[in-house]
Image (cartoon, grey):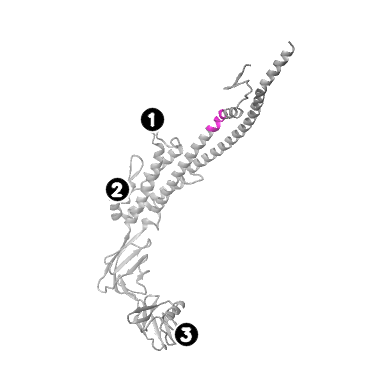
Amino acid sequence: MSSINFGSQAVGTGAGIDVQGLVDQAIAAASGPIVLLQRQQARNNAQSSALSSISSDLNSLLTAVNSLNDVGGQFNAQSATSSNTGTLTATADTTAAAGTHTVVVSSLATTSSYYTSAVTSSSTPLNTGSFDLTAGTTTTTITVDNTNNTLDGLAAYINSKNLGVSASVITDPNGARLALVSGTTGAPGDLTVANNSVTGLTFTKAVTGANASLTVDGVPISSASNAVTGVLAGVTLNLVGPAPGSPVTLAVAPDTSKASDAINQFVAAYNKVVTDINAQFNVNPDGSGGGVLESDGTLREVQQRLLTSLTYSITGNNGIVNLSSLGVNLNNDGTLSLDSSKLQSNLSGNFQSVKSFLQGTSPTGFAANFSDLLNNLTDTAQGPIGLDLQGLTQTNSDITHQIADLQASLAIKRQTLLEQYSQVDATLRELPLLQTQIAQQLGSIR
């Protein structure tokens, strides 16, 4: 009995065929278009990821540029420097005006306090009675009875009244004493104890609450606190020690260290953007090395617009007319480098011109001009990168639908092939029996 070949299988011996294997081979051969679409989708995903990363870089750069343009930000910070920090220190906010002031600290604000005579311990029973405790302008009668007639009980009772007075028990080798300390410095927090009828417990005033006394540019000032605000706009004077005959010079000026930090942050953020964009276009002579966006015209446009905006310049302004004159230089690869010495010299000797170049309104300063560009580039709805990302998202959505359609078509084709090959398999398995029957019939008619 002879056999025939079905694909790579010999048939005709009753063994049938590998239906599943044959169907899988046919479907695999027909799946080529799906594989190509999946590869395209993966590349689109890689491009979207790279664009999203660069978009994040641009948003970080926008934050740094806005900091340069923020009238209440780092570039407008003020510093206050004292010629004698043992007498006076100070801080200044962005509303402080630059200038030099003379301060004389005659006395510090004090915090009023009392203490009692000693008893054996904090739990020693006290005689009952009462006393009047005055904090500032408020007088409260403190009653000592069998619920609080120990120093511990009395301290807890006074603290529970929220009188603006802190009560505690101080213990030393002489015994235990009740201490009362005002919660408000200066004259407004002065304490008074009167009408004491608690036999055996006497009160002594340790410190009288008094205001600080000082002069600022010759003007006499009385302050209940040693942190003096409101005398110089935007400046807090911190009184450290009295020095009646020793004037202190206080200089308020732009904080060049914070201004320098703001410029450094801008340079670092800009270089991050440019470096990441350059990485997409760094193609070797043999064509290798580029990123997934090496053929993206949109990214080329973003790169060019960034470089163009860096050349922004104004006229006059005491020579601070562009980034280079400020001390920020453009390198051949599009990144920036900082001439720290030149920048510091400009910040120290020509601060207002630096500020005018960055934050001016007429003409528009560099920061505002650059911020406008970045707001456009980072616009997720209408910006070039946003539109690019939308296009990739839509393309991938379309590809997903195409893949689903092709997969549905292949599923139908698979079912059809399974049915056809199953019929062939059944026929081949019956073939030997048919051959035997035919042979028998032929033998019977001889």
Q: x, y (%) of residue 197?
A: 42, 89
Classify 10 Å Cα crowding around label 1: few (below 14), some (14-19), many (20 and above). Answer: few
Residue span colored magenta: 28-35
Q: Is residue 23 magenta?
A: no
Q: Is residue 443 above or below residue 122?
A: above
Q: Quadrant of residue 107?
A: bottom left
Q: Quadrant of residue 205?
A: bottom left
The kind of secondary structure the magenta stretch mainly shows is helix
Check if mark 3's residue and mark 1's residue have beta carbons within 8 Å.
no
Quadrant containing the N terminus is: top right
Q: Residue at x 37, y 56 (%)?
A: 74
Q: What is the number of the mark on residue 146?
A: 3
Which SS class for mark 3? loop
Residue indicated by mark 2 = 339
Task: Pick whichever, 350 or 422, lies toward us.
Answer: 422
Q: What is the number of the mark on residue 286?
A: 1
Task: Pick whichever, 425 or 255, lies toward us.
Answer: 425
Q: Residue furthest left?
A: 245
